[in-house]
């Protein structure tokens, strides 16, 4: 049997057919590679966003519980992230009254209170009568007819404690009752302005605060006096019945 010799035309046709088959698979590979690159890029962006720790623009710091546990002690995590409370009169800063410097959030370093704003309230926890403007946020809870105002770091939402109003301790009529483990003392001054965390600067609020400062001691005295009278009368009645 004789075979026809290969001509230039048949060779060119074979090459074209081979190139055509090769080109039909190339787009599929390119699409697959493009998808893999896009997926990889998306995953990297997602990780960066989730692990963002905030910056100089004042954005919120968001971390997972696992990330917070790596950067906080067990007690700090319990108080800052789970809203716990340290035992009274056990905190590092309860009786600490520096003449200068300031206090920052133990979780993120956000400047919260000046040393000047700290005062002795006798409550068993560090007390401050004002904070750096915009550094502290509040969450108001009025369940069971009681008004409790939680204070948290405005940058990382770390639990600081509670703020109490109209007790007559200082001119601001605020007492920020703060856990020692929620803050850290830092030497050096902070240039931020200081302000009340609850708006009480209006005429109505100021008059209410002043009236409360006058009435509250008298009210406490009246309650205590009435309680003593009740106890005395009860004791007298009990003794009378025993004598009979």
Image (spheres, rainbow, N blue to C red):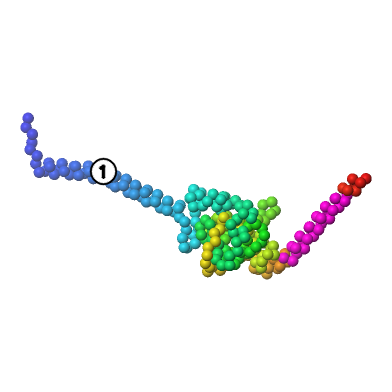
Q: Which residue is mark 1?
A: 25
Which residue occupies the extreme left position in the image? 2
Name the side, left or right, on which 154 lies relative to 127. Answer: left
Q: Secondary structure at mark 1?
A: helix
Percent of width and height locating residue 124:
65, 57
Percent of width and height locating residue 110:
52, 61
Identify the residue at image location x=39%, y=51%. 44
Magenta includes 236? yes
> Can residue 140 be seen by looking at this rendering?
no
Name the side, left or right, on which 142 lies relative to 53. Answer: right
Identify the residue at image location x=26%, y=45%. 26
Percent of width and height locating residue 101:
55, 66
Instruction: Classify 61 as above or below 133.
Output: above
Which residue occupies the extreme top position in the image? 1
- Image quadrant containing the N terminus: top left
Identify the residue at image location x=37%, y=51%. 41
Name the side, left or right, on which 48 lies relative to 189. Answer: left
> Which of the 4 quarters of the picture holds residue 192?
bottom right
Q: Residues within 10 Å of mark 1 (few under 14, many from 20)?
A: few
Identify the residue at image location x=23%, y=45%. 23
> Can residue 212 be seen by looking at this rendering?
yes
- Image quadrant containing the C terminus: top right
Numbered range of the magenta stretch:
213-237
Q: Nearer the viewer, residue 10 or 51?
A: 51
């Amino acid at each position: 049997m004789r075979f026809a010799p290969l001509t230039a035309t048949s060779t060119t046709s074979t090459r074209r057919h081979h190139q055509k088959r090769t080109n039909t698979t190339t787009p599929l590979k390119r699409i697959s590679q493009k998808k893999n690159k896009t997926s990889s890029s998306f995953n990297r962006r997602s990780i960066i966003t989730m692990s963002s720790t905030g910056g100089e623009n004042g954005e919120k710091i968001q971390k997972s519980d696992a990330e917070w546990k790596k950067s906080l002690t067990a007690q700090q995590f319990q108080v800052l992230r789970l809203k716990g409370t340290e035992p009274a009169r056990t905190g590092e800063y309860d009786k600490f009254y520096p003449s200068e410097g300031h206090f920052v959030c133990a979780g993120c370093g956000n400047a919260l209170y000046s040393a000047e704003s700290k005062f002795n309230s006798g409550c068993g926890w560090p007390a401050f009568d004002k904070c750096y403007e915009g550094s502290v946020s509040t969450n108001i809870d009025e369940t069971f007819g009681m008004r409790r105002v939680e204070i948290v770091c405005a940058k990382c939402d770390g639990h600081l404690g509670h703020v109490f109003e109209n007790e007559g301790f200082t001119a601001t009529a605020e007492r920020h009752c703060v856990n020692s483990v929620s803050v850290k003392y830092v030497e050096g001054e902070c240039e931020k302005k200081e302000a009340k965390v609850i708006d009480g600067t209006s005429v109505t609020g100021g008059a209410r605060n002043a009236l409360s400062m006058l009435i509250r001691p008298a009210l406490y005295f009246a309650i205590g006096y009435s309680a003593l009278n009740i106890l005395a009368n009860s004791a007298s009645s009990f003794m009378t019945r025993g004598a009979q």
